[in-house]
Amino acid sequence: MTRLVENDIAGLERELDVYEEELLKKTGLNLSEVACAGGNITIHDLRKAAQSYRVAVVPITSGEGVIGGFTQFVASIIRKMGFQATVTEETDVAGFYEGVCQENEIIFMADDKKFIALNLRTKKVIDNGYGTGRGFGAALAGMADGLAGREVLVIGFGPVGSSAAEYLLESGAKVAVYDQNELRMKETKKDMKQEPNLKQALKIYDFLIDATPEGEFISPEDLTDQAMIAAPGIPLGLNAQAFEKYKDRVIHDPLQIGVATMLALAVG
Ligand code: 2YC
C-alpha cells in the first residue's frame, strides 16, 4: 500500500468542487452516486444515514505519524456527502474516546497499515482498500455507461484490485487479471481470466483498472485508442504522455472515491 505524503493532499480540499464537476463530466455521476454504486446502497439510504449518523475522524500518530491535512481532507470528503464530520482535537486513543463521547457513531482512522471506517452502531468495519476498489469499479462503469458483458482488465490483484474485480463481476463484466506476482495470480477466482503478459493485454482491453503501486509503466502506444482507465493505484501507472492523451478518460485520486465508498459501505 502506498503511503501518502502531505503534498499528495495539499490544496485538494479547496478543489473538491472542481474535482466533483470533473468526475461528473467523465462518469455522469457525482461523488455520492459513485460511492452508492460501489457500496450497493441507494442515494435515498445515504441521505437518510446522513441525518442519523455523525462522523469523527481521528488523527493517529503511530508509525510515521500524522500526514499534514490527511484527517482534515477525509472529513471534508465526508461533509461533501452531506454528513456532519469533525476531526477530533485529541489523537489516537484519546481521540477515539473524544469521538465516541461526542456521540459520533462512525469513526474513520488510519495508521501506516490500515485505514478503516468503523460503524459503532452496527459494528461494521470497512477497509480503505476494499472501498477504493469498489468505488473505482463503479466509476469505470459510469464512464463506460455500463460494463455488463464487456471485458475489463484489472492490473494488480492486491486488496484494491481484488475488490474492484469483485465489483466488476457483480456488474456482469468479464474480468481479466494481470499481476506480476505468481502467487497473487493463483488467488484469482475461477470466473476471472488470467492474462500472462501485460504488454499484450494492454493492446486488447478497452477498459482498465490500474490497481498497482507502480508509476509511469504505461505509454500511449501500449493502449487501445478507445481505452478508459480507472486508476486507484498511487502513483498513476500512466506516464505523462499517456495521461496527456487519455486524461479525459482517466479517473485517478488519492482519497476521494475511496473515502466516499467506505462511508457508503459503513452505513449500508
Ligand atoms: O494523519 C494520520 O492520522 C496518519 N496516521 C494517516 C496515515 C495514512 C497512511 N495510509 C496511506 O497513506 C494510504 C492512503 C492512500 C489510504 C490508505 N493508505
Image (cartoon, helix red, strand yellow):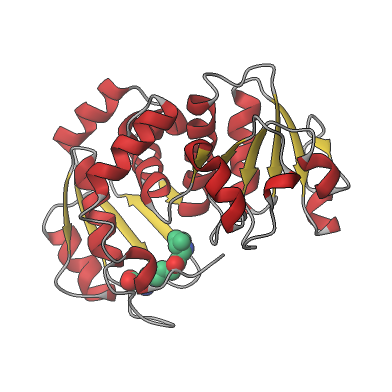
Q: Position of residue 211 (x, y in %)?
A: 62, 51
Task: Locate residue 169, reporting x and y percent.
Answer: 66, 27
In the figure, 157 relative to 33: above or below? below
Q: Is residue 147 above or below residue 220?
A: above
In this rendering, the answer to whether 264 lies above or below 77 is: above
Tell me the quarter of the image containing the C terminus: top left
Residue at horizontal 77%, vertical 52%?
A: 179
Picture coordinates of residue 109, whole percent (x, y): 34, 63
- Can you name the residue that lies furthest to the right here? 196
**Residue found farthest to the left:** 102
Number of marks: 0
Q: Quadrant of the N terminus?
A: bottom right
Q: Nearer the viewer, residue 93 or 136?
A: 136
Quarter location, residue 188: top right
Q: Is residue 104 left or right of residue 65?
A: left
Residue at x-position 39% and y-position 54%: 255
Q: Is residue 208 left or right of residue 267?
A: right
Q: Nearer the viewer, residue 132 or 122?
A: 132
Q: Is residue 231 visible?
A: no
Q: Nearer the viewer, residue 99 or 248?
A: 248
Can residue 113 be seen here? yes
Q: Quadrant of ligand 1?
A: bottom left
